[in-house]
């Protein structure tokens, strides 16, 4: 019986900026991160309520395949405005706060209360 030894290849590690979309050098990374966070919140509400995709679609005013896309975190087809409308349809208040930053460029964040 012969045994082979695996050689381990070094793994390249890069530190994240905190935004995977920026790390992947995708266009509009802050907007994509915002959409991902809003989509996650929509997903959690639908799951917590035990809604089927068809039931969620009726509440959101979209067809089931669109809810399926949301549930798989495929928010690319939806605007930030559309996602906030989904949240309000699900009985959530959405508050947008704009304030000056001390940085060169501002940032976008989602705070869930």
Image (cartoon, grey):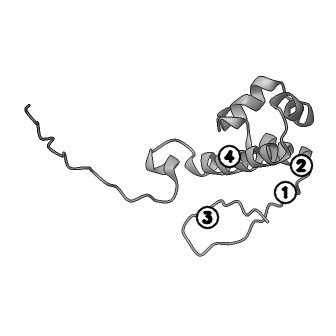
Callout 4: few (<14), some (14-19), or many (20+) C-alpha neighbours within 10 Å? many
Q: Identify the mark at residue 9; answer none if there is no mark.
A: none
Q: Which residue is mark 1?
A: 94
Q: Which mark is residue 88?
A: 2
Residue at the image position 73 percent from the left and 70 percent from the top: 99
Mark 1 lies on a secondary structure that is: loop
The reply to whether callout 4 and callout 2 are in contact (CB within 8 Å) is: no
| Mark sitting on residue 106 | 3
Q: How far apart in space, not on screen, are marks 4 and 2 (Cα)?
A: 15 Å
Q: Which residue occupies the extreme front position in the image?
A: 1
Mark 3 near mark 2, Cβ–Cβ under 8 Å?
no
Give the camera-side residue of 78 and 39.
Answer: 39
Q: Secondary structure at mark 3?
A: loop
Residue 9 vertical position relative to residue 60 in the rendered view, above or below: below
Q: Quick check: marks 1 and 2 in contact, CB under 8 Å? A: yes
Dot 4 or dot 1: first in sequence order is 4
Where residue 58 sits, quadrant-wise, is top right
Query: Which sits earlier in the primary sequence, circle 1 or circle 2?
Result: 2
Q: Which residue is mark 4?
A: 35
């Amino acid at each position: 019986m012969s045994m082979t030894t695996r050689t381990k290849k070094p793994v390249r590690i890069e530190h994240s900026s905190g935004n995977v979309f920026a790390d992947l050098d995708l266009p509009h990374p802050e907007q994509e991160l915002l959409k991902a966070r809003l989509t996650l919140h929509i997903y959690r509400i639908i799951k917590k309520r035990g809604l089927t995709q068809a039931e969620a679609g009726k509440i959101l005013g979209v067809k089931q395949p669109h809810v399926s896309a949301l549930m798989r975190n495929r928010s690319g087809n939806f605007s930030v405005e559309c996602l906030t409308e989904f949240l309000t349809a699900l009985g959530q208040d959405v508050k947008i706060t704009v304030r000056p930053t001390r940085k060169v460029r501002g940032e976008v964040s989602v705070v869930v209360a």
